[in-house]
Image (cartoon, helix red, strand yellow):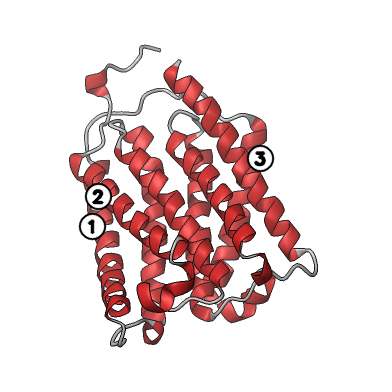
């Protein structure tokens, strides 16, 4: 089959690349608030998060998302940038829904000015990013051109691993979002209804990215997602190392969680390593 000429390929719009870049900067800030100021969310975040391991979990998600969005924003080909968009759109929309369900928990009217500012900033961001991304996505889909041929299909072991990880995250994330009080006992540390839904939104977003990676079935196209996936696994393991006392180590839940994170780190790193070699070769 004749290779597509550069002029025939669908390119990422300037608006989409700029939005991904801005979103990457915003999630970096949120990651700093939660990963560095982990135990001071009552002063520097949109709502107070306890225990600290929950804040560290959310912060790891934001910093991993920062990698995804910045790397995707650099991609001129839409086939290599779009891996970020459905996951970000799902996560931001669900986080907005969780916010609206628990507005009373947020620091609106707090005597701490930094906390109040963080709450309003949070609400504005999550009210504007999903519709802006959806509008840009509609415009992006209408752009002329086609995708380049797949260069490096995912190996079978990686497809099986991503299918297992993705469906597990989608199922647990949906349960936490819909029924956090009922599902929280399945989680290896304490979650409130709000933090349960926040964790659920992350699991659903990352689960969408894992299933999307299977659909793309090309290591080169999903290089940004694989890099982010490995960062997510690594940062979550570091969060556990910081706050091991917050975990309930009795029973299998905690150890299954650790094994899951190790598998995420392994799949992401191995895939990213091979994808990088293919892209540069």
Name the residue beneath numbered marker 1.
132
Dot placed on the residue nearer the N-terminal end, 1 or 2: 2
Other residues around mark 3 within 10 Å, as few (<14) / some (14–19) / many (≥20): few
Query: Quadrant of the image for the C terminus?
Result: top left
Evaluate whether residue 151 shows in this view. Answer: no
At a point 31% along the width and 83% down the height, the residue shown is: 112
Query: Quadrant of the image for the N terminus?
Result: top left
- Picture coordinates of residue 115 (x, y %)? 32, 77
- Picture coordinates of residue 268 (x, y %)? 56, 39
Q: Is residue 143 above or below residue 127?
A: above
Tell me if label 1 and label 2 are in contact, CB under 8 Å: yes
* In the displayed structure image, the side of residue 185 where residue 82 appears, left or right: left
- Marks 1 and 2, how far apart at CA: 8 Å
Where disc 3 sits, the SS reads helix
Name the residue beneath numbered marker 3.
160
Where disc 2 sits, the SS reads helix
Picture quadrant where residue 159 is located: top right
Q: Which mark is residue 247?
A: none
At a point 57% along the width and 48% down the height, the residue shown is: 234
Dot placed on the residue nearer the N-terminal end, 2 or 3: 2
- Marks 2 and 3, how far apart at CA: 32 Å
Q: Is residue 148 above or below residue 60?
A: above
Name the residue beneath numbered marker 2.
19
Dot placed on the residue nearer the N-terminal end, 3 or 1: 1
Where disc 1 sits, the SS reads helix
* In the displayed structure image, the side of residue 256 where residue 70 appears, left or right: left
């Amino acid at each position: 089959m004749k290779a597509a000429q550069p002029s025939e390929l669908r390119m990422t719009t300037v608006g989409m690349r700029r939005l991904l870049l801005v979103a990457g900067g915003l999630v970096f800030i949120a990651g700093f608030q939660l990963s560095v100021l982990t135990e001071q969310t009552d002063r520097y975040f949109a709502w107070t998060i306890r225990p600290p391991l929950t804040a560290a979990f959310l912060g790891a998600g934001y910093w991993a998302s920062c990698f995804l969005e910045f790397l995707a924003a650099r991609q001129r080909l839409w086939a290599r940038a779009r891996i970020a968009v459905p996951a970000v759109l799902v996560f931001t929309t669900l986080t907005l829904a969780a916010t609206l369900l628990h507005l009373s928990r947020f620091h609106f009217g707090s005597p701490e000015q930094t906390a109040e500012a963080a709450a309003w900033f949070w609400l504005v961001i999550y009210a504007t990013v999903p519709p802006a991304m959806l509008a840009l996505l509609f415009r992006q889909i209408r752009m002329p051109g086609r995708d380049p041929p797949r260069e490096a299909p995912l190996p079978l072991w990686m497809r099986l691993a991503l299918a297992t990880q993705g469906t597990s995250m989608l199922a647990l994330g949906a349960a936490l979002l819909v029924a956090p009080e009922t599902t929280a006992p399945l989680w290896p540390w304490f979650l409130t209804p709000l933090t349960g839904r926040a964790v659920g939104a992350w699991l659903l977003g990352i689960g969408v990215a894992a299933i999307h990676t299977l659909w793309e079935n090309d290591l080169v196209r999903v290089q940004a997602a694989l890099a982010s996936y490995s960062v997510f696994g690594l940062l979550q393991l570091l969060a556990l190392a910081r706050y091991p006392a917050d975990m309930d180590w009795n029973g299998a839940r905690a150890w299954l969680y650790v094994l899951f994170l190790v598998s995420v780190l392994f799949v992401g790193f191995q895939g990213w390593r091979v994808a990088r070699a293919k892209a540069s070769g």
